[in-house]
Amino acid sequence: MRIAVCVKHVPEGPSRIDPSTKRLDRAGEGALNHFDANAVEEALRLKGDSDSEVVAVSLGPEKALDSLRKALAMGADRVVLVSDDAAAGSDLVATSRLLAAALERQEADLVLFGQQAADADGAVLWAAVAERLGRPVISQAMELAVDGESVRVKRQTEFGYDTIEASLPAVVAVSDAINEPRYPSLKGIMGAKKKPQDVLTLADLGLDGAEAGEAGSGTTVLALGEPPSRGDARKIEGDSNAAQAIVDFLAEKRLL
Amino acid sequence: MRFLVFAEHHEDGIVKNALGVLGKAAALGDADAVIVGAGADLAAQLGRHGAKAVYVAAGDDALSTPLPQPRVDVLAQLAPDYDAVLFGQSVLAADVAGGLAARLDAGLNWDLVDLELQGDELVGKRPALQDSVYVDVGWTSSPRLALFRSGSFDPQESGGEAETHEVSVELRDFSTRTKMLEQAHAEAEGKSIEDADVIVAGGRGLGSPDNFTLAEELAKALGGAVGATRAVVDAGWYPYSAQIGQTGKTVSPKLYVALGISGAIQHKVGMQGSGTIVAINKDANAPIFEFSDLGVVGDVHEIVPKLTELVQARRS
Ligand SMILES: Cc1cc2nc3c(=O)[nH]c(=O)nc-3n(C[C@H](O)[C@H](O)[C@H](O)COP(=O)(O)OP(=O)(O)OC[C@H]3O[C@@H](n4cnc5c(N)ncnc54)[C@H](O)[C@@H]3O)c2cc1C
Ligand SMILES: Nc1ncnc2c1ncn2[C@@H]1O[C@H](COP(=O)(O)O)[C@@H](O)[C@H]1O
């Protein structure tokens, strides 16, 4: 079995939107989207000791290779990064097009996604990618089992718990409660360097610039503004006086 | 402007988020709605909430369970006649909207909290980056697709009547390869937290199921109830009945104390109406601090036992 896992490289720490491009400022440090570590872990769990292959796939700047290497260090077998200047600023429509083109070539039996991208909070990309691949999709998986031809998922919705089955090949997005991602071992980190790391351009995927980036997108950011103020929000640091400070605050608000 | 609203239903009614979005659409232009997998008896409810026409697709068995891909097939038939297709946030609606965006190559803006007509352009309002910035968003393709954050609009009854049209649909092969084996069973009932004046909610930062006693003891001292995030409920640390957020309960106590909770938007939508919000989290960049009245950067294991003692002392 081959399992592809879609992972995103997201900015670390507080992020900002660049007022000139109206895009997320991706210049600073980045890291593997922590929700995607659950998807990598689940792929590795399904692989177990078998000869299944786990391939991590990402769309992003060159620096996204750092996050892909973390997936390798955790135990993924190889990685594919789609990286091209013309792809910057891709929205859901464009991102799903590029990722689907890259996934198409992997011929994976199962494509896994994380719960959401910490910088975009969309929690929708899998549905768009599944549509482009023409495959069944199940989202929010908190339990997942593969048996030969199908995948079975338990997941939570607004109304309770569902159990859903789909035939393979399929697309599944996992929730952050599905497992506890492992930390890469030293051996894993050393071994990562030797594993295959493919970087593909749009041309490599047979796509042209008009299908990617802003040109290939269907949405646009018009203006940036401040959020409504929360009034006198306060923040304190440190453990030693914190409990007393909270009690004082509650007393002042007449909540005690 | 012509709007089509995805009228999600559960049991014998249209869900509240969808009705709220329908009301907004009807206020901005002509609003129609589409129901998939249920009967025309729900059309009257949609008419009262502002729908002019209601499309009902119910013929095929594959439409009867709430799975997204057959719904994409239905919406893809109707959507090209509209300027915009609107969805209220839900697990199902997000998957339908994402699939439709790819099918039609039509831009989708999500997590909107409002929609405006500026001249004859539609502009969506969206809090982004953990709600630290508000963004105006638009569309460069048609139909414009929009997914609204839970609770953005209250349903409005305008008392109209809708005409209903049946639609028949051709399902894609892959749309029928997913099967609902068991649907919407609730797990582990417990005491309702919706009426509590004080809620102490615990997240993964508590570290283990046993540490929920920290939340329970503080809640007891404050005379309140215990809430939880989805992450800990799905991990089996606490019952589903205590879950707060998009797929759990919506609460608005006078005081909400968040222990080891990151403050994801799906959690926020269930508790942002609280009077006063106090958060303890060891990560100074945690999103929860963007909407807390008092944010405490620190370790719950250090702070909470002391806090509980101080509260008990004050109250006795
Ligand atoms: C469709 C959908 C629906 C969802 N519905 C819901 C819902 O209804 N309710 C809900 O809650 N979530 C929901 N979620 C999940 C949501 O996005 C988050 O994943 C979830 O809320 C995270 O839970 P958490 O804050 O407990 O865990 P985490 O995000 O893991 O946060 C734990 C926090 O604890 C802090 N921490 C760790 N150790 C300590 C310590 N010792 N002291 C202090 N702080 C510490 C960490 O800094 C971190 O910020 C939904 C997601 C999706 C996609
Ligand atoms: N640029 C990207 N490259 C690869 N996978 C991605 C990318 N963006 C998002 N994903 C995947 O899609 C999931 C949901 O992202 P989103 O819908 O953007 O919140 C993430 O958890 C990842 O698994």
Image: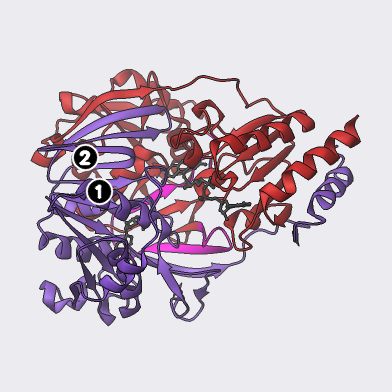
Residue A214 in view, yes or no: no
Question: Where does label 2 land, which residue?
Answer: B69
Question: Is residue A96 left or right of A253 when viewed as pictured?
Answer: left
Q: Residues in magenta?
A: B126-154
Query: Within 10 angstroms of label 1, few (less than 14), some, or many (20 or more) residues?
Result: many
| Percent x, y of residue B88 | 42, 41
Q: Is mark 2 within 8 Å of ligand 2?
A: no
Colour approach in the figure: by chain
> Which residue is located at x 46 percent, y 76 percent?
A29
- Point 53% across, 72% down: residue: A16
Decide which of A54, B229 is in the foreground and name it.
A54
- Tell me, by letter, which chain the rendering colours red: B
Subunit under mark 1: B
Badge 1 and badge 2 both on one subunit: yes
Q: Residue at x 54, y 36 (%)?
A: B209
Q: Image height check: is B314 above or below A7?
A: above
Whether residue B141 appears in magenta in the rendering, the answer is yes
Q: x, y (%) of residue B250?
A: 57, 34
Query: Is B260 placed above or below B70 here?
Result: below
Chain A shade in the render: purple
**Residue bearing the label numbered 1:** B99
Q: Quadrant of the C terminus of chain B?
A: top right
Q: Secondary structure at mark 2?
A: helix
Please identify the residue farthest to the front as the structure is shown.
A187
Q: Secondary structure at mark 1?
A: helix
Residue A181: within the magenta? no
| Type of the residue with mark 2 | Gln
Find residue B284 and report its horizontal and vertical position in percent.
Answer: 64, 62
